[in-house]
Image (tube, helix red, strand yellow):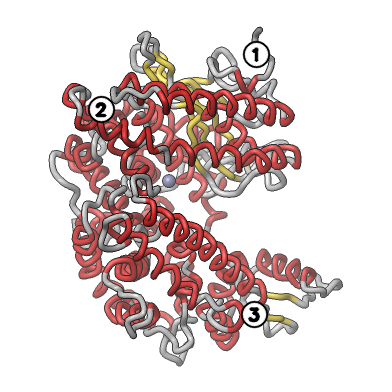
Amino acid sequence: MPHQNPLLENKTLPRFDKILPEHAKPAIETILTEAEKAFSALEKSLTPTWNGCVLPLRTLEEPLDFAWGIISHLHSVMNTPEWREAHDTLQPEVVAFSLRMSQSEPIYHALQSLKTGPEWSSLGTTRHRIIERALRAAKLAGVGLPEDKRKRFNAIKRDLANASTQFSNNLQDATKAYSLPLTTADDIKGLPQSLLRAASECAKQHGSTSSTPEQGPWVITLEMPLFAPFMQYSERRDLRETLYRAFVSRASTGKLDNNPIIDTILTLRQEMAEILGYSTFAEVSLTEKMADSVDAVDTLIERLRSVAYPAAKNEMADLQTFAAKHGETNPILNWDVGFWAEKMKEAEFGFNAETLRPYFQFPRVLEGLFDLARQIFGITINPAENGMPAWHKDVRTFEICDGDGTPIAAFYLDPYSRPETKRGGAWMDSVRPRHRRPDGTITLPAAYLVCNQTQPTEDKPSLMTFDEVTTLFHEFGHGLHHMLTTVDDPEAAGVNNVEWDAVELPSQFMENWCYHRDTLNKMSSHIDTGETLPEELYRKVCKARTFRAATATLRQLLFSAIDIELHHRFQPNNGISPDDVKRQIGEKFTLLPFTAEDRFLCGFAHIFAGGYSAGYYSYKWAEVLSADAFEAFKEVGIENTEAMATLGRKFRDTVLSLGGSQHPMEVFKAFRGRAPDPDALLRHDGLIKT
Ligand code: ZN
């Protein structure tokens, strides 16, 4: 009997014209029932070979990946109550099954035997990496531990999950609990209209039903969309100070105190690392990264710091001079930096997000982007010919072809914001990876590119801010990584199996082209005059990119250094608190000392409630890779189209093609001929001369 449920039709691209929320439950239940049966049978009949172990797993996972991928995607971009319900009720079952597979003892042992067996040497690097990764994931999931240790390990996992949830709940509650009421014209001095509107909305939520954006009253909380612009624009130094002090001490006292939770998390992570056979949690984290040791991370941080610190000092002196010239009689303190930096930026560059918008019409930007891709990577991108059904009328569908016209991949681009039903932010996700099947046929990769840029109006196309343009390039870079892969095994094709701190290389690399004069000429066209971005504005845009770059760098380094320190050298319960560590490190990484009540670790959700623990450095690590890769293009002369095409081809054949099939260091060396150079990032940020 043919399948009636479109979520089960995984031989084609998703039939978004047919898929409905009511298909989700029966499809996933059918898939899971069959998969569980097949998995149990497989566990009993495993042979330690590629065909006897890895291939059957792939076959078993494919229908689930396909259907669940679509459901998760629609949950993000068409978040109706029906899709939310379908997604949320099914998620626990899907997670449970994935967990069961990754924690299977028989699979683990079969993979281990495979690694020491006769077939291993003939499998090649790609398959070695796939198997080693599966083994590592299993090991980190506690598989292979003796019974008593495993019990303790599972208890730690559970306690850690609870502690992280508690951490983020406390942080959220503390963030919401604080409010700064503003009532007089003096209180709102300097605040832009958009902030007043938001602050009036907030006042209404706090019970002030009569609030208007013009008359107030207004309320500011510690939530980013209110806090950040207030610190940037408020002319009331005293209120900035009050708000700043509240912000850095969030969730650090009373019922919502995160300090004890930080202790618990660090202690449990250390114990977990030891159970797994590592000496610290940072070592556990690094097993899945490109950076091969804490030393390598330390070295990068110190190299960048040694240059950024004195440069940031100069930036601070400039800011102080600027503030004094504009009437500030006090020395600049923590709550003044954002405010004066904003004023200085306005004075130096005289443009803002709105100034550039009329130059960037979405259709023209896309043309410029696709033309660039043709120039440097030799690919052509055209609207999908056979019509790929999509989930929304605004979604555009494209096909990528090689220079000779051979189709390589397809993608969906969902560009505009739809606040009611679409998650914020921008991302690339896999519809399916490239896959050469045992019979030799190839399934081409496909990707979702999702942005949240300004919508078009009835008579005008979407006019993009420069940020929206760079975001589009960024996600397109992830997309190319996924789609230009030539790896045949889906487990390592495209972005699959790429180490976490290397995965942003192609995306950040693509962002650089937004500052490329030629590309800008092609993609900018003023909505009224048709004029390309004027030279003067172009120079300002380039200069603004590195405005106060040392200060920004130093801040990221501070977070990276604290994160690594706490997860590597720090000994929990040893008389020194995490906050003491923060203060010690701050001496080398900040220009203004932390205030007495500062407990920003209590709000450092990235490492205590997110996935960045002992991985915060990855931001900088990946920036080094992308800056260094881009520098190769500058070296050959970026206006030399022929040389660019040759180098572009090399980038395509290495970074974009090899995906997760080789270690990222090998991939990088294949492109650059040497290991990455941190100084490339310093040059990119204008911190050392080129
Ligand atoms: Zn990214």
Residue 522 position in % (x across, y down): 43, 34
Q: Quick one: 406 or 430, which is closer to the camera? A: 430
The crowding category of the residue bearing disc 1, from other C-alpha atoms within 10 Å (few below 14, some 14 to 19, many at least 20), is: few
Question: Can residue 665 be seen in this snapshot?
Answer: yes
Query: Which quarter of the figure has residue 661?
Result: top left
Circles 3, 1 touching at the beta carbon (< 8 Å): no
Circles 2, 3 touching at the beta carbon (< 8 Å): no
Label 3 amino acid?
Lys
Q: Which residue is mark 2?
A: 653
Residue 32 position in % (x across, y down): 58, 29
Question: Can residue 554 be seen in this snapshot?
Answer: no
- Left or right: residue 661 versus residue 411 is left
Residue found 32% across the figure and 27% down from its top:
377
Label 2 – label 3 distance at C-alpha: 55 Å
Label 1 amino acid?
His
What numbered label is drawn on residue 3?
1
Q: Quick one: 167 or 332, which is closer to the camera? A: 167
Q: Is residue 299 above or below residue 661?
A: below
Question: What quarter of the picture does the C terminus occupy?
Answer: bottom left
State which mark lies toward you, 2 or 3: 2
Determine the secondary structure under disc 1: loop
The crowding category of the residue bearing disc 2, from other C-alpha atoms within 10 Å (few below 14, some 14 to 19, many at least 20), is: some
Q: Which residue is mark 3?
A: 189
Label 2 – label 1 distance at C-alpha: 39 Å
- Left or right: residue 449 versus residue 644 is right
Determine the secondary structure under disc 3: loop
Q: Residue furthest right?
A: 210
Mark nearer the N terminus (2 vs 1):
1
